[in-house]
Image: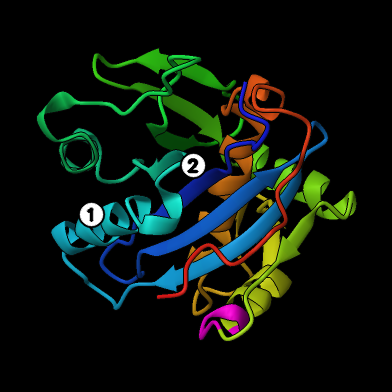
Amino acid sequence: MNDRPRRKFVFGLDIGQENDSSALAVDERLGSPPAQHVLGHLELFPLRTPYADVVDRVRSLVNHRTMVDAIRYVAIDATGCGRPLVEMFYDALFPGGSVPTDLVTREPLVRLVPVLWSGTGVQVTKKPMGRWVEYIVPKRELVSQMAVVLEGRRLTALLKGSPHVRSWVEQMRVFRRKMPKATTVESYEAAKATDHDDLVAASMLAIWVAENIMPKEYDMSYGKATPRPRLAFRC
């Protein structure tokens, strides 16, 4: 058994549409449950960045030299773009269908986790799709999980120097739960139509997957020492 634990990262990617940018948040999970979380990288893509460029950028970060020995989950919002985009990510992350695995535990070191956000009245659903497993998750679950982590003071943001930290803080401030008077269907989004929530959505996605999908065994498999948090990238 290696006394040095593997670092555990989740790349949360909110896919932009016509009027919204794609956004990436990288969360590092530390320690045994209840785990601590370190938000070490934020990235906001220019509006209407081609999906192929987004895929290539995420692939380059997942394979960054600082990530070689880490466990990496790539959680993507597949709600609007669906299977074709997931196929693009799979082919980029696993060329030739080769999935890197740990030689001892045989667990994959890189895993693709497509998530479809749903409305209320739907339970979290796990759906095998052949080469990957897809998750259908009510948006309230992602919001609630982020709230639990924040209230437990389990989130640290190591974003010094990031050009997007102010945007992330502002998006967190104006993010709201909405329930129109004419319906019982609730929604979670920015307070005003002119506000954006892409960075918040990406970080919520990363936190939810780290808390609910990444196996808890990873916290114990490589010794009890907990690595010190640090910036995910310096690029």
Q: Residue shown at 24%/14% (left/top)?
A: 130
User: Residue 92, percent across and down?
Assistant: 18, 43
Dominant SS type (magenta): loop
Relative placement, left or right, of 116 versus 185 is: left
Q: How many marks?
A: 2
Relative placement, left or right, of 94 versus 116 is: left
Identify the residue at the far right of this view: 152
User: Residue 216, percent across and down?
Assistant: 68, 23
Q: Nearer the viewer, residue 5 or 235?
A: 5
Q: Check disc 2 and report the residue beneath it.
A: 70
Q: Residue shown at 41%/19% (left/top)?
A: 103
Identify the residue at the far left of this view: 96
Q: Is residue 58 above or below residue 70?
A: below
Which span of residues is magenta-colored? 162-166
Circle 2 packing at 10 Å, graded few (<14), some (14-19), many (20+), is: some
- Res. 16 in view: yes
Query: Looking at the picture, which amino acid does disc 1 mark?
Result: Val
Circle 1 packing at 10 Å, graded few (<14), some (14-19), many (20+), is: some
Q: Check disc 1 and report the residue beneath it.
A: 55
Tell me the distance, in whole angstroms, between the alpha carbons under discs 2 and 1.
Answer: 20 Å
Q: Secondary structure at mark 2?
A: loop
Give the quarter of the image for residue 51. Answer: bottom left
Examine the structure image and report whether residue 210 is included in the region drawn in magenta. no
Q: Secondary structure at mark 1?
A: helix
Rendered-image quadrant of the C terminus = bottom left
Per the rendering, the mark at residue 108 is none
User: Residue 234, percent across and down?
Assistant: 46, 74
Relative placement, left or right, of 64 versus 155 is: left
Q: Residue shown at 72%/24% (left/top)?
A: 220
Q: Nearer the viewer, residue 184 or 78?
A: 78
